[in-house]
Image (cartoon, rainbow, N blue to C red):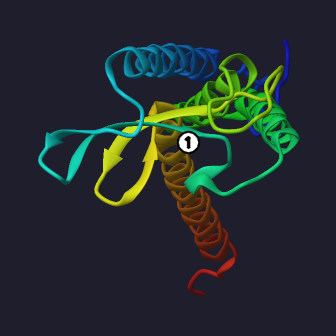
């Protein structure tokens, strides 16, 4: 006869690969979409000319961005470091997550970083005088009012950040509720019964 403690923890189950697979699928699909839309914008739009989609509010305008977000000037090596950091953070965090929302956010963040890095690696420099490896400009083409122009990769970074913030906030609320429930249960067990 074997004896086992009823309160013994069961053997840990292997983590599901679904979150990792989802993140990789999202990242790959968004990078392909990003590069395809940039190619389309370059073949169909004249640089700098606004093509209305919904009047003056939303349209298309092909611009080349040699800098960071909002056209802020920054050295090209900085973008490589940021892309590598994003990839490392995602690679370390993703296998630990069980949340599909969080996995989706990681996939979008990775896709955004890779999409713009590909531009800097392989596209020509259209704005400055320099050319060569990692000197390319990012192709932006979505015009939204007076807001700076952006692309699919930029959108993926923004949506990914919002989703990750929401997922982490929800995870923290669930953990806090479980902790409060456990403390409440422990307090009720420790409370002496009526005499």
**Which residue is most to the front?**
129
Q: Is residue 6 left or right of residue 54?
A: right
**Residue 195 vertical placement versus 187 (above, below):** below
Image quadrant of residue 40? top left
Where is residue 101? Give x, y as percent: 49, 37
Q: Secondary structure at mark 1?
A: helix
Look at mark 1 in the image and give the residue it sits on.
157
Image point (67%, 49%), residue name: 68
Image point (83%, 33%), residue name: 84
Image point (52%, 40%), residue name: 154
- Viewer-closest of 141 and 3: 141
Where is residue 190? Give x, y as percent: 70, 75
- Viewer-closest of 1 and 100: 100
- Viewer-closest of 61 and 13: 61
Q: State which quarter of the image contains the C terminus.
A: bottom right
Q: State which quarter of the image contains the N terminus.
A: top right
Q: Is residue 173 visible?
A: yes
């Amino acid at each position: 006869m074997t004896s086992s403690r009823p309160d013994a923890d069961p053997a840990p189950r292997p983590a599901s690969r679904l979150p990792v697979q989802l993140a990789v699928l999202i990242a790959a699909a968004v990078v392909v979409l990003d590069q395809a839309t940039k190619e389309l914008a370059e073949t169909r739009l004249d640089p700098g000319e606004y093509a209305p989609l919904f009047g003056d509010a939303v349209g298309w305008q092909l611009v080349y961005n040699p800098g960071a977000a909002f056209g802020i000037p920054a050295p090209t090596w900085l973008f490589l470091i940021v892309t590598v950091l994003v990839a490392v953070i995602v690679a370390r965090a993703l296998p630990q997550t069980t949340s599909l929302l969080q996995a989706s956010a990681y996939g979008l963040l990775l896709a955004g970083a890779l999409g713009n890095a590909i531009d800097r690696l392989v596209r020509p420099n259209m704005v400055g005088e320099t050319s060569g490896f990692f000197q390319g400009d990012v192709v932006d083409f979505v015009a939204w009012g007076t807001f700076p122009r952006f692309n699919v990769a930029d959108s993926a970074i923004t949506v990914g950040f919002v989703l990750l913030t929401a997922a982490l906030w929800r995870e923290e609320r669930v953990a806090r509720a479980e902790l409060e429930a456990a403390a409440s249960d422990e307090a009720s067990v420790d409370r002496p019964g009526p005499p």
